[in-house]
Structure formats: structure tokens, C-alpha cells
Image (cartoon, grey):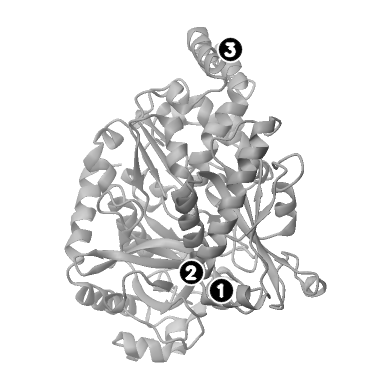
């Protein structure tokens, strides 16, 4: 990756932050000039559209699922359906219905939206740690894996995650992510078809003999998972390094001195930490919002006392949202040059005719649904992410990820992920609880159980919220003191969480007062319970960048695994 390109895109972005109206208006004009005469454009009268108000009248808000009929026409070979230039690849992500998303990516979208966003996002890291780009052999890139096996859309085109893009196919060789051009990082061809779990081990094995200075993690679940992998797999790592093998194949010169060094660390400390392997690691690029804001401080300790966290850009598969410009822990200003943004207050659902606000009309400390329009054919597309305005840079709102647009309701309270997360964060501060991870589930009460869905969400006739939580720093759960410690902390957290949920949600407070909502139930689980679930998901074939934390856990089976007897400390506490 070229530093000059990173800094030029960053300067261009910074220049946009004081003039959001002008930048967004010019972008809309450019999108319409390029795509108005497509099949979608003609059907919606886009050739006559000039302003955002006219766009609002012409095009209803849709989810990606509602846009799929046009996407499918493009995949069936019809030209000019959503975009003037044809899709080259389709970005994938699991949709809210469980059906895989197909987000069309054209060369224009890549050139005008995605790549400027991508480059600009590395500027804070480059400014603080110049060697991140100057010495790519010292970067471990967990997020990008352009050589991983790829799926295909039904027309044969690649159906991939953004982390799998080979930018050289777009004529952008300089966009190859930091760490991916290092000769040592390449997984050999005979192992290329390996599954995600094996590939994640291969990355660690290859990096273990390098002087890693920067870690590109992006997804915090992967950053938290790496120390767990080292703890579980260090004997295999030592064996491979000593023999010079990778996946059973000869790969490098045997290195018994390095193997002995790693083994000494593991035996002396009872585990292997990242800082044992890479004592000169200085920076990690990672999302530091959502649940990660609660557990990353402890995770960072395993990487070394001087390691800095750099916020990763905020995006969904449908499009980019925010680009970091400074060391703010979790917020980034909107990427005005790349997407036309509209917002719907998140205190209610998004509908086709929801009234929307523009960037200059947002209020600080409010949650909003995000609606995208851009060159890639996503016209007024409502995404599942909710963002919160946490300040401004110039005249542009600074946003952070607040949660998905999922809600739960035991008694009509419509508790949002954002409110549930803020309540948990406040309750942890109230009690001093430090956690490795946590997730909520709504447990319908006996009267509602007959109508509860597969996730245990009742029809609104009552129930209680349960929180499975892995406390940080707890010893092994077979030791008796842990039970008392976890029991006391769970009791305190349950009381504080119940109060904080009432603060965040008037509906929850009313439900508690009426007795329709029972006291919140805190269930301490094994310290590694969430990491084991992460491992299970990756072993089952899911690429690590796609395995995310869940504020509301979907699926009763996952809940049963997390709270299984062999995983949890036997203590449950309700407020």
C-alpha cells in the first residue's frame, strides 16, 4: 500500500468535513448522471431527479432483501439493471432473514466509493506508526485473506466478503492490504483449500517467526480470539517451528531455537501470550465499539503494555459509513464523498415511507437507522446497523456503531440493542465488573412459552431478560473461590443492570413495575465460553471476519451451549 495514496485520500476527505451540504449534493448529482438511465432509474423516474427531496419522493426506502429482484436480474445477465457498468463481484454477508446478501460491486463503485474510503481509513495508523506501510513484512493482517477459497454467485461471478477482495483485479496493486505482500505471509498452494480454522492457524504459524509490529484485526472477535488460539495451540506451534513444517508439509528451515524459546515462555507463564511472540508490537487496528468496548481493555494486556488501539473504519457490506481521522476511541465522521446518507431516528422501525434526516440535521447522543445511496446501485437502502452521533468533526457528525436494529419485547418495551448495550456498560461501571464477553436472551415466562419462537422471544405477554456473562480474570471454575466470587459479582451486576435497563428503556421500566417483566437474570459462564463458541463457528466453516459479537444472541442452541453445565459457574442471580 502506498503512503502517498493514503494521505491524499485522507486530505480529500478532511476537506469535505466543513461543507457536508455541498459534498452530498455533488455526490447525488454524480450518482444520478452515472446511473439514472438504468432499468431501475427509468422505473423510478431518476432522470428527472435533481435533489434529495425529489429522490425521497421517487424511491421508497428498501432493505437489501427488497432490492434483490433487481440484483437477481443483473445476475441473470440483464445489462444496466441497477448500474450503468456491470457488477464485477458481489459482496456477501448474512442477511437479517438468514439469506446470503449479494451486494453488487462495480468498477465505478470501487473507484469512487470503496477505495477512497479504504485508503483514507489507514491515515491515523500511518501518521502514528509510519512503519505500518513502510515495512509490510512486520504486519500481521488477520482480516484480509484474498487467497481464501471463494464462493460464486449463480452467474459465476465471485461472491465474497470485503476482506477477500484482490484489488489487483481492479488495477489497484497498491491497495493490497498491509501484511499481504510479505513473502512469509503466503499460505502455500497445497494448503490453499483449507478451511477457515486451519487457515487462521497457518497465519499464526507463519507470523510466529516474524518481528510483528502491527496487527490488522478489524473484527474484535478475531483480536480476542488470537490469544485464545495461542493458549490452545502453542504445542502444535512449537512442533511446527521446530520441524519447519506447516500443516504437515515442509515449509521453512527448522528453527529449534525459536521453538525452545516459545516453549519456555509457555511453560513459565502457563500459556503463550501475543507479547511473548511479538515484544515490539505497537498497534492494533480494530473496531472498538459495541461489546468490544467492554472487553478489549483486558484483551490488549495480552498483546503488551505499550500497544495502541486504532479505530477501524465503520462500514456494512452495503457501504461505508465512517472514516477515523484521529485517536477517538470509537467514533468516526461520515464518509461524505462516497455515500449519500439519510437517517431515521432509531426509536422506531424503518418503513418504506419513513421521513429521513440529512447529516446536518442529526442530534448528538441520538441513535439513528442508516440509509445508503451510492454508485453501486444501493438506492435508499436501509441497513441493519444503528449508529449513534457522538460529536462532530467540522460540521460533519461523528458516529459510532451502536448495535443492530434488532429489538426484543417481553411486554411491549421494544428494547433495542443500543439501549441494552448502554445499560450493560453502565452496570459494569457501577459494579466494577470486567467482562470477557456477554450476550442477552429474552426468556418468555411460563404463560408465554407456548407462543415463544425458536430464540425464546415471547409475543409480548411477559418474561425476563437473561444475560450470559464471562467475567474477566476469573480462575478455573472448578475452584471453590470462583463460585463465591462469580456469585457475588453476578448478584451485584443483576441489580445494577435491572436499574440501568429501566433508565435506558421507559417500556422496560413500565414492564418491571407492572410485573410483566421479571427481574433480569445474570448467568456467569466459563471464562472461555464465548471463545469456544467462536472456535466452533469458525471450525464449522465460517470465515473469522464474519463471526461477530451478538448483543442479542440469535438461536436457542447457541444459548444452551454457552450456558451448558460444563461451561458455566453454578451461580444465577436475578435483580
Residue behind mark 1:
509
Query: Could you tell me which residue is drawn at 47 percent across and 49 percent down?
Result: 294
Lower position in the chain sequence, tag 2 or tag 1: 2
Query: Could you tell me which residue is drawn at 48 percent across and 31 percent down?
Result: 186
Question: Alpha carbon of mark 2 to alpha carbon of mark 1: how far?
Answer: 7 Å
Q: Is 61 placed above or below 210 here?
A: below
Query: Could you tell me which residue is drawn at 62 percent across and 42 percent down?
Result: 486
- Say which quarter of the image contains residue 22: bottom left
Q: Are marks 2 and 1 in contact (CB under 8 Å)?
A: yes
Residue behind mark 2:
503
Which callout, 3 or 2, points to the residue nearer the camera?
A: 2
Residue behind mark 3:
243
Query: Could you tell me which residue is drawn at 56 percent across and 47 percent down?
Result: 437
Looking at the rendering, in which quadrant would you find the N terminus? top left
Question: Alpha carbon of mark 3 to alpha carbon of mark 2: how far?
Answer: 58 Å
The location of residue 362, given as percent across then percent down, is 31, 76
**Foreground of the two, 143 or 150:** 143
Asked if residue 285 lies left or right of residue 19, the reply is right
The location of residue 149, given as percent across then percent down, is 58, 44
Badge 1 marks a residue whose secondary structure is helix
The location of residue 45, given as percent across then percent down, is 40, 90
Badge 3 marks a residue whose secondary structure is helix
Amino acid at each position: 500500500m502506498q503512503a502517498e495514496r493514503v494521505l491524499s485520500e485522507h486530505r480529500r476527505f478532511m476537506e469535505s468535513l466543513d461543507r457536508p451540504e455541498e459534498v452530498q449534493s455533488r455526490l447525488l448529482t454524480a450518482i444520478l448522471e452515472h446511473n439514472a438511465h438504468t432499468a431501475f432509474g427509468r422505473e423510478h423516474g431518476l432522470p428527472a431527479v435533481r435533489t434529495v427531496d425529489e429522490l425521497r419522493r421517487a424511491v421508497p426506502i428498501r432493505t437489501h432483501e427488497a432490492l434483490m429482484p433487481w440484483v437477481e436480474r443483473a445476475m441473470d445477465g440483464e445489462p444496466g439493471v441497477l448500474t450503468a457498468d456491470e457488477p464485477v463481484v458481489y459482496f456477501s454477508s448474512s442477511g437479517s432473514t438468514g439469506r446470503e446478501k449479494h451486494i453488487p460491486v462495480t468498477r465505478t463503485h470501487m473507484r469512487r466509493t470503496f477505495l477512497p474510503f479504504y485508503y483514507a481509513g489507514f491515515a491515523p495508523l500511518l501518521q502514528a506508526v509510519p512503519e505500518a506501510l513502510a515495512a509490510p513484512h512486520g504486519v500481521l493482517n488477520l482480516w484480509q485473506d484474498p487467497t481464501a477459497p471463494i464462493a460464486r454467485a449463480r452467474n459465476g461471478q465471485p461472491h465474497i466478503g470485503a476482506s477477500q477482495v484482490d484489488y489487483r483485479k481492479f488495477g489497484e496493486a497498491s491497495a493490497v492490504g498491509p501484511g499481504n505482500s510479505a513473502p512469509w505471509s503466503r499460505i502455500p498452494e497445497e494448503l490453499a483449500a483449507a478451511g477457515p480454522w486451519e487457515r487462521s492457524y497457518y497465519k499464526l504459524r507463519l507470523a510466529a517467526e516474524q518481528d510483528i509490529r502491527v496487527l490488522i484485526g478489524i473484527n474484535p472477535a478475531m483480536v480476542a480470539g488470537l490469544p485464545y488460539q495461542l493458549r490452545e495451540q502453542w504445542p502444535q506451534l512449537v512442533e511446527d517451528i521446530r520441524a519447519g513444517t506447516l500443516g504437515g508439509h515442509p515449509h521453512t528451515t527448522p528453527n529449534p531455537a525459536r521453538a525452545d524459546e516459545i516453549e519456555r515462555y509457555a511453560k513459565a507463564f502457563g500459556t503463550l501470550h501475543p507479547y511473548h511472540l511479538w515484544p515490539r508490537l505497537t498497534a492494533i487496528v480494530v473496531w472498538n465499539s459495541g461489546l468490544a468496548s467492554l472487553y478489549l481493555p483486558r484483551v490488549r494486556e495480552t498483546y503488551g503494555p505499550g500497544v495502541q488501539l486504532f479505530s477501524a473504519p465503520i462500514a456494512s457490506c452495503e457501504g461505508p459509513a465512517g472514516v477515523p481521522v484521529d485517536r477517538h476511541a470509537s467514533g468516526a465522521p461520515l464518509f461524505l464523498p462516497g455515500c449519500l446518507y439519510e437517517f431515521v431516528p432509531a426509536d422506531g422501525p424503518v418503513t418504506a415511507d419513513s421521513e429521513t434526516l440529512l447529516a446536518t440535521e442529526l442530534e448528538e447522543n441520538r441513535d439513528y437507522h442508516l440509509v445508503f445511496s451510492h454508485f453501486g446501485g444501493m438506492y435508499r437502502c436501509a441497513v441493519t446497523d444503528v449508529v449513534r452521533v457522538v460529536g462532530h468533526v467540522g460540521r460533519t457528525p461523528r458516529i459510532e456503531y451502536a448495535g443492530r436494529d434488532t429489538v426484543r419485547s417481553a411486554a411491549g418495551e421494544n428494547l433495542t440493542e443500543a439501549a441494552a448495550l448502554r445499560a450493560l456498560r453502565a452496570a459494569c461501571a457501577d459494579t466494577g465488573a470486567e467482562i470477557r464477553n456477554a450476550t442477552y436472551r429474552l426468556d418468555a415466562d411460563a404463560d408465554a412459552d407456548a407462543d415463544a419462537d425458536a430464540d425464546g422471544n415471547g409475543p409480548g405477554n411477559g418474561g425476563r431478560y437473561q444475560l450470559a456473562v464471562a467475567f474477566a480474570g476469573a480462575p478455573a471454575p472448578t475452584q471453590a473461590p470462583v463460585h463465591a466470587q462469580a456469585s457475588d459479582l453476578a448478584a451485584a451486576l443483576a441489580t445494577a443492570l435491572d436499574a440501568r435497563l429501566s433508565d435506558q428503556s421507559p417500556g422496560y421500566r413500565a414492564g418491571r413495575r407492572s410485573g410483566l417483566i421479571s427481574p433480569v437474570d445474570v448467568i456467569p459462564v466459563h471464562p472461555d465460553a464465548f471463545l469456544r463458541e467462536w472456535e466452533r463457528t469458525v471450525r464449522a466453516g465460517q470465515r473469522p471476519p464474519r463471526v461477530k459479537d451478538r448483543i442479542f444472541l440469535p438461536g436457542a442452541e447457541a444459548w444452551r451451549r454457552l450456558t451448558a453445565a460444563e461451561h458455566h459457574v453454578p451461580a444465577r442471580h436475578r435483580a
